[in-house]
Structures are given as C-alpha cells and as structure tokens.
Image (cartoon, grey):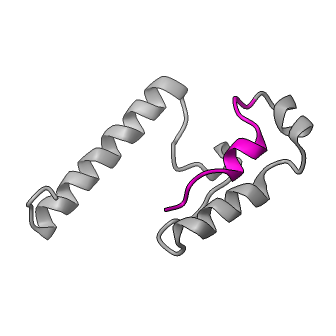
C-alpha cells in the first residue's frame, strides 16, 4: 500500500512504535506494552475476525447491568450485532 520495500517498511514500523511509546509515556506515564494495563489482550495475528469478536464477548461481563455498571458507552446487545462481513 505504501509502495516501499521490506527494509523501509521495517524502519517505518520501528519509528512508529518508538513514537507511540514515547507519546504514551508522556501522556499516561506508562508503557503501552504493559499487558497489565488492559482488560483483554488478543493476539490478532493468530486468529480471524470472528474469533476476535468471540474472545471479546467472552471477556465481557455476562449481563447488561454488570456491563453498564462499568460505565461503558454501549451495551452487550449492541456489540453482539456487529457486522463481521
């Protein structure tokens, strides 16, 4: 998509990750790679989109009231209606 070779792509990604880490540290004072910061970590390189959604749904609270109590902007029913096509 960017019409670059493997070396340029690698350098671009390294620079992007370095910038992201510095920004995250400056704004939040933490490391974005610290898995303890996240409720769910999904290795997206190993599964398809449908399995990703299933893993997210499994990690969510089991009922609407528990979900709403955690101050999320949408409910479980809205997320389950996501179009996977």
Task: Residue at 38% x, 35% y: name it.
Answer: 22
Residue drawn where x is 70% and y is 52% of the image:
80
In this image, 78 relative to 26: left or right?
right
Q: Position of residue 6 (x, y in %)?
A: 15, 69
Extreme top residue here?
27
| Front position in the image: 83 or 7 | 83
Relative to 9, does residue 68 appear above or below in the rendering?
A: above
* Residue 1 higher or lower than 76, as above or below: below
Left or right of 23 on screen, residue 42? right
Pick whichever, 1 or 16, lies toward us: 1
Position of 4 with respect to 75 (left or right) is: left
- Highlighted range, magenta: 72-85
**Dominant secondary structure of the residues highlighted in magenta in the image:** loop
Q: Is residue 79 above or below residue 24?
A: below
In the picture, residue 13 is in which quadrant? bottom left
Judge whether residue 60 is colored magenta: no
- Front residue of 26/81: it is 81
Is 84 colored magenta in this rendering?
yes
Quadrant in the picture for residue 74: top right
In the picture, the quarter occupied by the N terminus is bottom left
Q: Position of residue 72 (x, y in %)?
A: 73, 31
Residue at 63% across, 60% down = 53
């Amino acid at each position: 998509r960017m019409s670059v070779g493997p070396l340029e792509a690698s350098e671009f990604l390294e620079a992007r990750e370095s910038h992201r880490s510095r920004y995250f540290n400056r704004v939040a004072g933490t490391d974005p790679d610290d898995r303890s910061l996240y409720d769910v970590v999904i290795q997206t390189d190993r599964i398809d989109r449908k399995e990703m959604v299933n893993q997210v749904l499994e990690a969510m609270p089991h009922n609407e009231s528990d979900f709403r109590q955690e101050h999320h902007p949408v409910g479980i029913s809205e997320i389950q209606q996501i179009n996977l096509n």
